[in-house]
Image: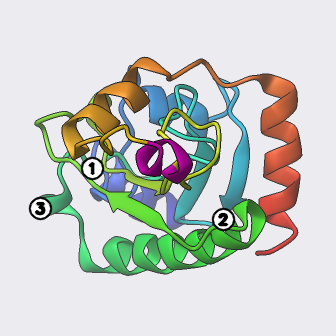
């Protein structure tokens, strides 16, 4: 009798929340085929450090199901992703000692990997060496950077994620989850 039930489900299309794309970078990370600096994981979501971070601590929160567009994300996954974004953002602000964040989710335009993911990016802290002009320089006669100039400098300052630095940061964020 059970073989009859099993036979009835053969070749049945997978539910969208179980689907994965063989070539998708994030699906490959989720399957363990590619390495990543995991910050957080549960049965529906994974959070990893971005390998080309805009700023230190730049983290991606990704549903484990391959859904290319945010507008197609099922409510149960949207809820799980939202919960993870909030949890990881809280831990990240503590680990970075900076409550300023940018949280971004692109759909198609500017989406390097076509799999829903949220970027949690610590905001620049003025007076630090993170590619942003310090407030002292602005007061010393130089005009403060425009938003465009700041973003351009930040983009140009991006470097590949260092594995050792990633492990230290992962440990710090995980300790706060």
Q: Earlier in the sequence, mark 1 or mark 2?
A: 1
Tag count = 3
**Residue 142: % across, % down:** 36, 37
Task: Report the disc number at residue 67.
Answer: 1
Nearest the eye: 57 or 15: 57
- What is the secondary structure assignment of the residue under circle 3? helix
**Could you give the CA–CA distance between mark 1 and mark 2, rounded to whole angstroms?**
25 Å
**Could you give the CA–CA distance between mark 3 and mark 1, rounded to whole angstroms?**
9 Å
Query: Within the image, what quadrant is residue 16 found in?
Result: bottom left
Q: Which residues are magenta?
A: 135-140
For mark 1, does the 10 Å Cα neighbourhood hold few (<14), some (14 to 19), or many (20 or more) residues? Answer: many
For mark 2, does the 10 Å Cα neighbourhood hold few (<14), some (14 to 19), or many (20 or more) residues? Answer: many
Give the number of the mark in front: 1 or 2.
2
For mark 3, does the 10 Å Cα neighbourhood hold few (<14), some (14 to 19), or many (20 or more) residues? Answer: few
Residue at horizontal 31%, vertical 50%?
A: 116
Predominant secondary structure, magenta span: helix
- What is the secondary structure assignment of the residue under circle 1? loop
Residue 167 in view of the camera: yes
Nearest the eye: 128 or 112: 128
User: What residue would you read off at disc 2?
Assistant: 92
Nearest the eye: 83 or 175: 175
Q: Earlier in the sequence, mark 2 or mark 3?
A: 3
Give the number of the mark in front: 2 or 3.
2
Q: How is the image coloured?
A: rainbow
Residue 59 in view of the camera: no
């Amino acid at each position: 009798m059970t073989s009859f039930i099993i036979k009835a489900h053969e070749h049945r299309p997978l539910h969208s929340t179980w689907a994965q794309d063989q070539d998708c970078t994030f699906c490959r990370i989720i399957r363990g085929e590619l390495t990543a600096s995991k910050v957080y994981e549960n049965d529906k979501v994974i959070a990893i450090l971005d390998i080309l971070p805009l700023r230190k601590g730049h983290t991606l929160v990704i549903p484990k199901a391959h859904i290319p567009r945010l507008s197609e994300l099922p409510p149960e996954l949207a809820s799980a992703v939202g919960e993870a974004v909030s949890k990881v953002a809280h831990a990240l602000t503590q680990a970075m000692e900076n409550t300023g964040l940018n949280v971004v989710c692109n759909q198609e335009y500017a989406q390097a990997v076509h799999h829903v993911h949220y970027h949690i990016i610590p905001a620049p802290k003025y007076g630090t060496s993170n590619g942003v002009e310090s407030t002292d320089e602005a007061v010393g006669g130089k005009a403060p950077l425009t938003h465009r100039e700041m973003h351009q400098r930040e983009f140009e300052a991006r470097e590949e994620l260092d594995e050792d630095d990633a492990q230290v940061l992962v440990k710090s964020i995980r300790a706060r989850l």
